[in-house]
Image (cartoon, helix red, strand yellow):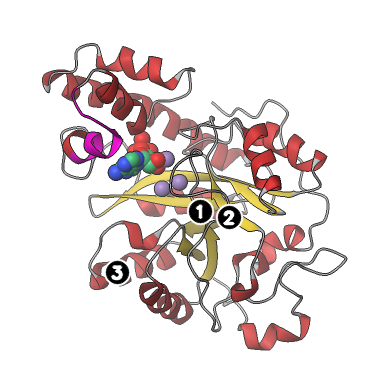
Amino acid sequence: MPMPPTAASNSAGAQSATGDASGSLPARFHDATGIDLHLHSTASDGRLSPDALLHLCHRRGLHTVAVTDHDTVAGLAEAQQTARSLDMTLLPGAELSCRWRGIGIHVVALLPAAPGAVLADGLAQLSEARHQRAVEIARRLERAGLAQAFERAREEAGSDRPLGRPDFARALVTAGLVPDLPAAFKRYLGAGRPGDVKTHWPELAVVVDWIVRDGGVAVLAHPLRYRLTRRKLTQLLDDFTAAGGEGAELVSGYQNEQRTYDLAGLLERRGLYASLGSDFHYEGGALAPGTLGPLPTGNVVPIWQHPRLSGHATRSAPASLPTTGSVS
Ligand code: AMP
Ligand code: MN
Ligand code: MN
Ligand code: MN
């Protein structure tokens, strides 16, 4: 893995936070504004269509975004079309499900272009795994008292996309078994609960390999949200780096400032690039596109300076995407 340059060695090229006339992105992570590299649409468990999502991002002043739906790139073609019409830069992306030491982990793939054959095949495998997992979740929830769980979750999803735990959570709320979504996760779907099924997901190193082999950049999603001890977190970062992972989300939505600074040090020591994103899913929640905790100062190198993503960093014409948008 190439070591990223330090921010200091790069500062000669630094631009203002909003970029210069040619649209360069800031050289320092701390100066990032208008960038959100973790967003969901109706292609997975987000509530806005890719088109509506891009329009919201534009209204909120964002210029560079990645749509990172769970295990799919089905929303990218539409998102790309809207991004072009709004003169925004869209990085093709996806958030891949996997496991590490029995824990469900998410890896964001940021791609220089549409997925190649390896990642497309990997996403097809994840789509099938997601379906099989939904069947198992439904079986378990039926035992726990939610009759016709699969059908109910399908109805909540409102389309034929692969089901996720939020669809089952809504079904539990609609059926009156729990008062709200947090309670659904707490009692039925969260870590260690009956609906927490991880066995279908591939290992972390496998999904990282798919991304890297296709020329993408593997970014560990929201490292502070897995509730790991610091020791476990450092092990995860070590294993992720050894597998070929090259970046991690230093700032994901709101997070504790002190922990962000600590995480920045962990990334720097491993030569990992720093990414950022809101993990926005729907309006009315705590997060909106572009809402983030404080960005740390220091020498972490922003992910948009990665050589394989540098075509996006200059905000040149975005890479082409398939018109179907579907890989499965
Ligand atoms: P899945 O990808 O099907 O395993 O579902 C994971 C998704 O569930 C996450 O990406 C969030 O969108 C959502 N989620 C996870 N935990 C919670 C929670 N405690 N409350 C509400 N939504 C959650
Ligand atoms: Mn989600
Ligand atoms: Mn995630
Ligand atoms: Mn996400």
Please determine whether, in this image, residue 2 is positioned above or below residue 94.
Answer: below
**Side (left or right) of 226 relative to 206:** left
Type of amino acid under label 2: Gly
Residue 297, x across and y down, in percent: 54, 81
Mark found first going from the N terminus, 1 or 3: 3
Give the residue at mark 3.
235
Mark found first going from the N terminus, 1 or 2: 1
Please determine whether, in this image, residue 47 is positioned above or below residue 18.
Answer: above
Q: Secondary structure at mark 2?
A: loop
Give the residue at mark 2.
290
Residue 52, x across and y down, in percent: 65, 33
Give the residue at mark 1.
278
Question: Of 136 and 151, which appears nearest the observer?
Answer: 151
Residue 326, x across and y down, in percent: 60, 27
Question: Of 328 and 76, which appears nearest the observer?
Answer: 76
Distance between the alpha carbons at the discs numbered 1 and 2: 6 Å
Q: Please indicate, yes or no, whether residue 245 appears anywhere in the rendered image.
A: no
Distance between the alpha carbons at the discs numbered 2 and 3: 30 Å
Which residue: 60% across, 70% down?
302
Q: Secondary structure at mark 1?
A: loop
Question: Of 24 and 177, which appears nearest the observer?
Answer: 177
Residue 106, x across and y down, in percent: 40, 50
Query: Mark 1 touching mark 2, by CB under 8 A?
Result: yes
Type of amino acid under label 3: Gln
- Residue 181 part of the magenta segment: yes
Q: Main secondary structure of the magenta part?
A: helix
Q: Residues within 10 Å of mark 2 (few under 14, many from 20)?
A: many
**Side (left or right) of 285 relative to 7:** left
State the image quarter where residue 138 is shown. top left
Which residue: 63% across, 82% down?
7
